[in-house]
Amino acid sequence: MSARSAGSVKKRSGGSEMARALFETSGDVLTDRRFEMARQLHARGDAFAAADLLQQVVERAPGFAAAWFLLGQVRLAMDHGAGAIEAFRAARREDPDDRHGAALWLARLDAAPIFGAMSPAYVRTLFDQYASRFDTALVDNLAYRGPELMRDAIRHVCAQRDRAPHFARVLDLGCGTGLAGAALRPLAGHLVGIELSERMIELARARGVYDDLEIGELRAFLERPHEAPYDLIVAVDVLVYIADLEPVISAAARILDRSGLFAFTIESRAGGDHAADDQIGDVELTGHLRYAHGESHVRGAILRAGLSAVGFERVSTRMEGGAAVPGFLVITGHP
């Protein structure tokens, strides 16, 4: 029975109770109250009062990762960069999984490399928390149109190749709540979705457009054995959470049918491209804590994966701050 009818989902194992406790509470009621007061003060713009309370919190509970992370944010608001780095490093130390994303803030402060700064635990936590308002925030507030742009681009390539826009096996990487799956369902025979966030995939399950859904890390899923190649693989606004695109594109290429297509959207660097051999320099971490890639990085990753670009166009899948976010929509295939 398919996931569209039965809604079966394969689940990952969770973290330890101790890790969850340290993430959510200090373990002491009075300390937690001070932490909550500090959070409210920070929200009201009183960074100095919040910093004073948070200093007391981390002295009483030095293993409280959430307090260290908030202290880093508060110190940033005070223009105390060195103090923010110290606090973010402590948050990273006390939560090795880095569910708050302290490594990303360290990278933004030039205190850590941007490659490897985004942990799977951070992405999972982010989207677990975001799931209930994800569709409204994207579609209504950010004028999101990534799935529609993807669907139309795939149809256009099919028309150019004089082939029907229908694919027997389709894989939706980072399927989220199923927005892309809904747009691509008419093109798919068997539609599979893979997603890191359990709460997001439950919403995708409720949408009822997938034949199979699985919770797991994208690259690990791609690198394991599969029953058969996929005729179409898509990643709509997913690779913005990955710095180095080459491993993922190479893994996707290995399970892509010889006549299949791998299509993805990414955000593009605002400052222009670097030389093609400067792969690290051609990736940046934006203020929204997503990765933006230069064209040379993308084309280099495609080439080294043994694929060729079938389509490569500048698009914007969303608006932010009243401006279109620049990006690329890329369609690749085996030569």
Image (cartoon, rainbow, N blue to C red):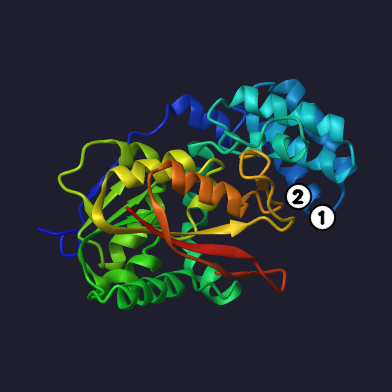
The one of 268 and 258 positioned closer to us in this rendering: 258
Does 286 appear above or below 187? above
Tell me what residue is drawn at x 80 percent, y 48 percent.
Answer: 42
- For the image shown, how many numbered marks are present on the structure? 2
The secondary element bearing badge 2 is classed as helix
- At label 1, the amino acid type is Arg
- At label 2, the amino acid type is Gln
Residue 326 x/y as whole percent? 64, 65
Do we see residue 315 in this rendering? yes
The residue pinned by badge 1 equals 44
Quadrant for the C terminus, please.
Answer: bottom left
Residue 75's label in the rendered image is none
On the image, which quarter does residue 176 sit in? bottom left
Residue 245 x/y as whole percent? 50, 44
The secondary element bearing badge 1 is classed as loop
The one of 123 and 232 positioned closer to us in this rendering: 232
The residue carrying pointer 1 sits among few (fewer than 14), some (14 to 19) or many (20 or more) residues within 10 Å by Cα, namely: few
Q: What is the distance, in whole Å, between disc 1 and disc 2 at their CAs?
A: 6 Å
Work out which residue is located at the far front of the displayed protein and give it.
Answer: 335
Quadrant for the N terminus, please.
Answer: bottom left
Does 32 appear above or below 284? above
Work out which residue is located at the far left of the displayed protein and give it.
Answer: 1
Residue 273 x/y as whole percent? 68, 52
The residue pinned by badge 2 equals 40
Does 34 appear above or below 319? above
Horizontal placement of 164 versus 41: left or right? left
Task: Tell me if label 1 and label 2 are in contact, CB under 8 Å.
Answer: yes
